[in-house]
Amino acid sequence: MPHEVDGSFVALPLRALADAALARARALGAEHADFRLERVRSAAWRLRDARPAGSSDVTDLGYAVRVVHGGAWGFAAGVDLTMDGAAKVATQAVAMAKLSARVIAAAGSPERVELAAEPVHADRTWVSSYEVNPFDVPDEEKTGLLAQWSAGLLAADGVSHVDASLMTVQENKFYADTAGTSTIQQRVRLHPTLTAVSVDPGGDFDSMRTLAPPAGRGWEYLTGGTWDWSGELAALPELLAEKMRAPSVRAGRYDLVVDPSNLWLTIHESVGHATELDRALGYEAAYAGTSFATFDQLGTLKYGSAHMNVTGDRTAEHGLATVGFDDEGVAAQSWDLVRDGVLVGYQLDRRIAKLTGFERSNGCAFADSPGHVPVQRMANVSLQPAPGGPSTEELIGSVDRGIYVVGDRSWSIDMQRYNFQFTGQRFFLIEHGRLAGQLKDVAYQATTTDFWGSMAAVGGPQTYVLGGAFNCGKAQPGQVAAVSHGCPSALFEGVSILNTTQEAGR
């Protein structure tokens, strides 16, 4: 059943504050102005060995005014929920734009801020897809379920410690601009995690974490059968015990079957960030790097094999980056980034779209709080499955000598998103099409184009899983965004495998 926006948020003087701010910006000569009021509630619970180890519950409430004046950006934020306060913040934003314009002129730069056109979306409301708001569930019920699951793991042989956590967010936004767009939105998301730790008598230790990804869902994600929690938790102790006994991998080249629980992170780092156009143009060079996928290669760069079809998507149900409208009033869309292995698109906001000749932004502006300016952020970037494609078991069955990679762990990638290394939660040796036990100390290493170019097959829709993370970082000052990445299982041929203990000893 569709939800309505939280009544306590709607009761705030949203439109009155926006009208006061936008009217002041217009009176001061702004070419464009937008107003964004946000309330973001974030809560988390942590348990250690089934006992409470900490909790937090924080609400961030405020608003921001962004303007274009004299061809330059201006931005200011405030918390005074009065008409005078909103007008004052708009005045500060215009003053900042005037100062920026003088600095730009003194530097001799001809660049002026212009925004790609966007249809007006007046009085629109959007609420994400969920059944039970986790903030409507008593805290005792949340911690009780985590404690129950933790106790079950602790009772298993070989499990020495268990860490459990649950993160929940409810994000409310009101947006209005001088073109006439006004939107109200509500997003709910959560991330439950359990990690089992084993310590043997000799002091050797290792851990294994649940594979359940964070999701744009409600409390039903933990209780309603969306994820097989009982099955995963029951299997975890024996999988961890097998990992503790597993032999160390022999470095070399292997065919890899990569599970969606691992591949989503490789997509995030090597495709998601690399196809942010502000990064490809050099705007992130001082902090988060650039991109090998430069703008002059659009339509020609062979990113991967012909099996590689990747979309940017702000509409995927339960996606962490799914919205109705972005923080520039642009309606959510889905579009191609890589088609048949060739780079065909980028992620855009309105300024970058106009600057590079695109008719319209694809809705990738986002600010993580009312005190931050919107920047270009990642959509749900996803590898598409093959219609009628093979199952994970069939992909494994096609491999004579290889490794099946499950779950994400550590990773490293260079500033151009080109050379990388990834590990995982567990690795299974494949011999003659069958799993032949776990390996440990495994990492796969490649360049982005070599790795995706080695992709020989992708699984069918039945293997597709929407993974993701709460903590994608970007910008200065730093901002954090939640983003999902869907993908099927996939087969990669002849990938370089490193032994991490040998590498650490060099």
Image: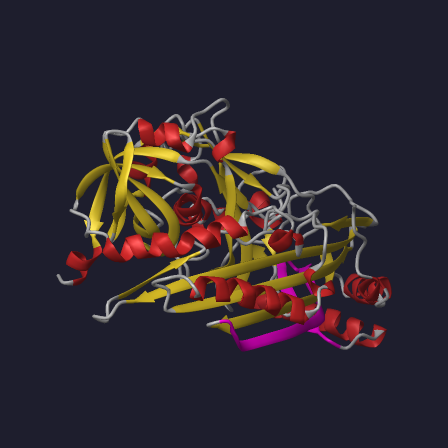
Q: In this view, does 378 lie to the left or right of 198?
A: right
In the picture, residue 66 is in which quadrant?
bottom right
Residue 290 magenta-highlighted: no
Residue 210 position in % (x across, y down): 45, 55
- Left or right of 466? Residue 406 is left
The image position of residue 105, as x and y in percent, is 54, 63
Q: Can residue 327 be seen in this view?
A: no
Q: Which residue is drawn at 20% across and 49% down?
A: 498
What main secondary structure does the magenta stretch of the protein show? strand
Residue 162 x, y percent position in the rendering: 43, 67
Residue 55 counted in the magenta span: yes
Q: Can residue 470 be seen in this view?
A: yes
Q: Relative to 73, is 504 on the left or the right?
A: left
Could you tell whether 323 is left or right of 275 in the image? right
Query: Outermost residue toward the left?
Result: 506
Q: For the C terminus, which image quadrant?
A: bottom left
Q: Position of residue 82 (x, y in %)?
A: 83, 75
Q: What stretch is highlighted in magenta?
A: 50-79
Q: How many numbered callouts?
A: 0
Q: Name the residue at 77% across, 52% down.
A: 183
Q: Nearer the viewer, residue 498 or 227?
A: 227
Nearer to the camera, 43 or 83: 43
The residue sitting at the top extreme is 388
Q: Residue at x 50, y 23 (%)?
A: 387
Q: Decide which of 311, 30 is in the foreground and name it.
A: 311
Give the colour scheme of this rendering. Answer: secondary structure
Residue drawn at (36%, 53%), measured in percent from left and top? 238
Q: In this view, does 186 lie above or below 46?
A: above
Identify which residue, 253 or 112, lies in the foreground. Answer: 253
